[in-house]
Image: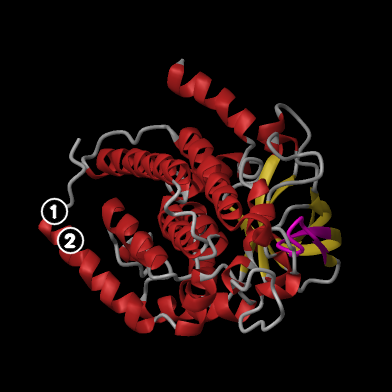
Amino acid sequence: MDLAFTPEEQAFREEIRAWVRSHLPEDIAHKVRNALRLSRDDLQRWAKILGSRGWLGHGWPTAFGGPGWTAVQKHLFEEECALACAPRVIPFGPVMVAPVIMAFGNAEQQQRFLPGIASGEVWWSQGYSEPGSGSDLASVKTRAERQGDHYLVNGQKTWTTLGQYGEWIFCLVRTSTEGKPQTGISFLLIDMKTPGVSVRPIKLLDGECEVNEVFFDNVKVPVENLIGEENKGWTYAKHLLSHERTNIADVNRSKRELERLKRIAKAEGVWEDQRFRDQIALLEVDVIALEMMVLRVLSAETSGKNPLDIAGLLKIKGSEIQQRYSELMMLAAGPFSLPFIEEAMEAGWQGDFPGGEVANAPLASTYFNMRKTTIYGGSNEVQRNIVAQTVIG
């Protein structure tokens, strides 16, 4: 296992760093640096900038118009984007559904859907979870009945991240009730402008409508929007999740937020408190350990070995770190972090804030939002069971 970057990889990092810092709009970087609200326009503007360079699909092979980077190069790209305070690439199009279309879609589907994903023009959403199907995803009940040249879809999806912006959604739908639950699931692409599709926002603890419910009421979906074979959707869903092996750790954002924590601690005068600095040091050690775990996975992939099946470990540790840095930011600011003012999430907000440090205004919102990290993507309790079975044995 070699965790040192080669001279070529270091040169690649410098190239990425220079390009990102010269092309990332400063107003967007300001919002990310200070945990302010990002609009749909902000997110898509950065996606289109990356798309114009051919880097929105930074994990794509050259055969489909991607850069054909190695696992290490992809990691370095993501790290430099995070450290430059670029928004995270919304993964549902370029990271999730695109690899499924590449692997299991036909040539017509690839030509139809991939260009819009690569350019950032089309916003995709994910239709997996349902009110009774979260960690137990195989129990999905949204039904798709074949009627001639189309499917008739009825049901509900929930926790659809940024679904209010969605133009297309990829869904797991039930096309058969025979046999095991996994054998009756299909993978369907649905135009969200189709009559019968409705979206209802869900307001979270932080006051944001980051997730949504999506309802399907007799929605007609052309059969040509079926990916692969009917009733084989579970196989495609697992392929999709395999592309989140290291991303789910979100270690690059944690490294950036660790620096933000230090800035807040210094501004609030608690940096000189040895006990508080010890807590920051312990967090930094865990961030470094998480990064080493990610690099172990990348080293295995680069050397041609079987990647370590530790996605569950990455998710557990990554989500706990995100909660800890948001908690330490609150502790650093003390009582000045407590007011929850939704308007403070807007860039340029000039309202009165106790303590005078406007940087403290978004802290409560960030803290509330991070309560979700140990629940989504398979709760940490479920992940520990998976780790026990697949890693420990």
Which residue is rendered at x = 52% and y = 55% of the image? 96
Three-letter residue code for mark 1:
Thr
Give the quarter of the image for residue 163.
bottom right
Q: Is any part of residue 189 visible from this angle?
A: no
Please state the horizontal and vertical placement of residue 342, each as a whole percent of the image: 74, 70
How far is mark 2 from mark 1, CA to CA? 6 Å
> Which of the two residues, 124 or 50, is positioned nearer the viewer here?
50
Task: Tell whether position 201 is magenta.
Answer: yes
Please state the horizontal and vertical placement of residue 146, each as a whole percent of the image: 78, 52
Cβ atoms at labels 2 and 1 below 8 Å apart: yes
Judged left or right of residue 184, residue 252 is left
Residue under pointer 1:
6
Which residue is rendered at x = 60% and y = 81% of the image? 41
The relative height of residue 192 versus residue 95 in the rendered view (above or below) is below
- Give the label on residue 341, or none: none
Judged from this view, the residue extending furthest toward the top is 393
Judged left or right of residue 384, residue 81 is left
Task: Tell whether position 309 is magenta.
Answer: no
| Circle 2 Cα neighbour tier, 10 Å, few/some/many (<14 / 14–19 / ≥20) | some
Judged left or right of residue 110, residue 187 is right
Query: Of helix, strand and loop, which one carries label 2?
Result: helix
Judged left or right of residue 92, residue 61 is left
Residue under pointer 2:
10
Three-letter residue code for mark 2:
Gln
Judged from this view, the residue extending furthest toward the left is 7
Which residue is rendered at x = 18% and y = 59% of the image? 9
Please state the horizontal and vertical placement of residue 326, each as a whole percent of the image: 57, 52
> Which of the two residues, 348 or 152, is positioned nearer the viewer here?
348
Query: Of helix, strand and loop, which one carries label 1?
Result: loop
Q: Is any part of residue 338 visible from this angle?
A: yes
Instruction: Read off the magenta span.
Output: 199-215
